[in-house]
């Protein structure tokens, strides 16, 4: 176990429509450890909006109490919270600095000022940036560089890609959470944090599509050259799979969800007619079906989700092919709660005609984390992990909770390594 007396703590919360995930990580030097994690039913939310403030706050409070009980101490750490919404958009913006005829050395202060200007520019349009990525640095209108620090130029232009959300949506979540958490925090996009928590650097560089099988809807995000290039949503999610099972088998929502988890499959052709028992709508009557019939119901709705997602995949593929790649090198990464359904990768491979893998933190190229096996292998915890690394080490992110500029943090880390 790492020395807690010299540990930096990060508390991450991912707010979903069905469950709220919580994760506390500790970092000491370069060693990470999972200190607490929990999942509670989400209440008061519907279609990405807060419909019952009291129920919503109670859900968050329940999660925080469970985390504190595991830690056996109060939560005193950096906080980052992600949420799901169909309102997230991707926007590009360019910020320039012209120093005249004299060439100047590009410093952290210059880059920091330009990033702040980009953020303010985005806010002028009534949007709140949750993630900002430096897409390209151009020096003197001709030199494209990966890192302009200490280089000399008379002019610099930076292209930024940002994930934004309408101010009213941001304020809705921020104001309710501020009353509950009572500790400074950042808000992030669950879709972006999910991708950041499961993807590898080569996948993000070469091109990849993430299909996040959420509860109310399916989130889609594509990366190329290390940054998001397209996001979209399919208005069908795991809720609709559960509803189908509930309606066809005449059982409760909760029992339908249990059946999917314990006996379901995304592929049914080779399944046997094994009998499956479940409780009827009244909660007492014992009914029976077969694993094959159950999986036929599940398969139909999952295929619809995949087929609707394929349009997004084809659009991304066409864009990446224009840049000289053959297809999408990283293929498709399935994540979210729906990614845990057995054999879903088989179905996705058939629909997308592309390599498919399950996305969870354990399959990313992020640092290994002590005592995290259970949640690191769980696709539904992807955003909780992605949140932490969005504020702890991603150089493209907005200013972390501690108000330390991310570029300055990188410089400080390099300086510490050199000492």
Image: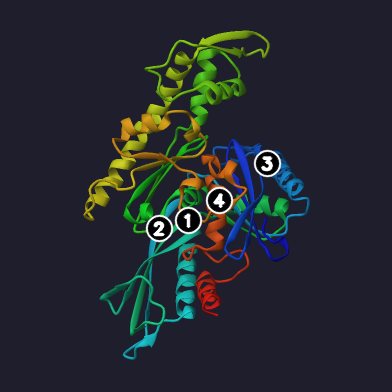
The residue that label 1 is drawn on is 164
Residue 19: % across, % down? 61, 38
Q: Secondary structure at mark 3?
A: helix
Q: Kindly indicate whether the residue at mark 4 contacts the one at mark 3 (C-beta within 8 angstroms).
A: no
Q: Secondary structure at mark 4?
A: helix
Q: Kindly indicate whether the residue at mark 2 contacts the one at mark 1 (C-beta within 8 angstroms).
A: yes
Q: Nearer the viewer, residue 179 or 378?
A: 378
Pointer 3 or 4: first along the chain: 3
Q: Kindly indicate whether the residue at mark 3 contacts the one at mark 2 (C-beta within 8 angstroms).
A: no
Q: Secondary structure at mark 2?
A: strand
Residue 31: % across, % down? 59, 60
Q: Is residue 137 above or below residue 13?
A: below
Where is the N terminus found, in terms of image quarters?
bottom right
Where is the C terminus found, in terms of image quarters?
bottom right
Could one spot residue 231 in this view of the protein? yes
Which numbered disc, 3 or 4, marks the residue closer to the eye?
A: 4
- Neighbor class of circle 3 (other Cα within 10 Å; few <14, some 14-19, many 20+) is some
The residue that label 4 is drawn on is 385
Pointer 1 or 4: first along the chain: 1
The residue that label 2 is drawn on is 91
Q: Which mark is residue 56?
A: 3
Q: What separation in Å lies between label 3 and label 4 (alpha carbons)?
A: 22 Å
- Neighbor class of circle 2 (other Cα within 10 Å; few <14, some 14-19, many 20+) is some
Pointer 4 or 2: first along the chain: 2
Pointer 2 or 3: first along the chain: 3
Q: What separation in Å lies between label 1 and label 4 (alpha carbons)?
A: 20 Å
Residue 330: % across, % down? 34, 47
- Neighbor class of circle 1 (other Cα within 10 Å; few <14, some 14-19, many 20+) is many
Could you tell me which residue is drawn at 37 percent across and 30 percent down? Answer: 346
């Amino acid at each position: 176990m790492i020395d807690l007396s010299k540990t930096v703590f990060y508390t991450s919360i991912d707010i979903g429509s069905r469950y709220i995930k919580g994760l506390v990580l500790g970092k000491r030097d370069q060693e990470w450890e999972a200190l607490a994690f929990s999942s509670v039913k989400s209440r008061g939310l519907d279609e990405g909006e807060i419909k019952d403030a009291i129920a919503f706050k109670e859900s968050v409070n329940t999660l925080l109490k469970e985390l504190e009980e595991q830690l056996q101490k109060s939560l005193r750490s950096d906080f980052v919270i992600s949420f799901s919404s169909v309102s997230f958009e991707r926007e590009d913006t360019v910020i320039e600095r012209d120093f005249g005829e004299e060439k100047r050395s590009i410093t952290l202060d210059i880059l920091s000022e330009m990033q702040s200007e980009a953020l303010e520019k985005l806010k002028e349009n009534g949007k709140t940036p949750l993630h900002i990525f430096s897409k390209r640095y151009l020096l003197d209108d001709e030199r494209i560089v990966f890192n302009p620090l200490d280089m000399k130029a008379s002019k610099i232009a930076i292209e930024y890609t940002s994930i934004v959300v309408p101010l009213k949506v941001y304020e809705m979540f921020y104001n309710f959470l501020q009353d509950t958490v009572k500790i400074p925090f950042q808000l992030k996009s669950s879709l972006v944090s999910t991708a950041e928590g499961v993807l590898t650097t080569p996948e993000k560089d070469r091109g990849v599509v993430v299909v996040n099988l959420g509860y109310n809807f399916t989130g889609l995000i594509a990366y190329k050259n290390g940054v998001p290039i397209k996001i979209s949503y399919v208005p069908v999610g795991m809720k609709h799979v559960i509803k189908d099972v509930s309606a066809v088998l005449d059982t409760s929502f909760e029992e339908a969800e249990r059946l999917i988890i314990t006996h379901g499959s995304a592929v049914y052709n080779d399944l046997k007619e094994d009998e499956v028992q479940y409780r009827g709508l009244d909660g007492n009557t014992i009914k029976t079906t077969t694993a094959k019939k159950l999986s036929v119901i599940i398969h139909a709705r999952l295929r619809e989700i995949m087929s609707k997602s394929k349009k997004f995949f084809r659009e991304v593929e066409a864009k990446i092919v224009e840049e000289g790649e053959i297809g999408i090198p990283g293929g498709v990464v399935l994540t979210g709660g729906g990614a845990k359904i057995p054999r879903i990768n088989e179905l996705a491979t058939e629909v997308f005609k592309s390599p498919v893998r399950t996305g969870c933190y354990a399959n990313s190229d992020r640092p290994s984390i002590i005592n995290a096996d259970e949640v690191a292998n769980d696709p539904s915890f992807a955003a909780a992990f992605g949140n932490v690394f969005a504020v702890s080490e991603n150089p493209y992110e907005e200013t972390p909770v501690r108000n330390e500029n991310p570029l300055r943090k990188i410089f400080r880390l390099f300086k510490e390594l050199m000492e």
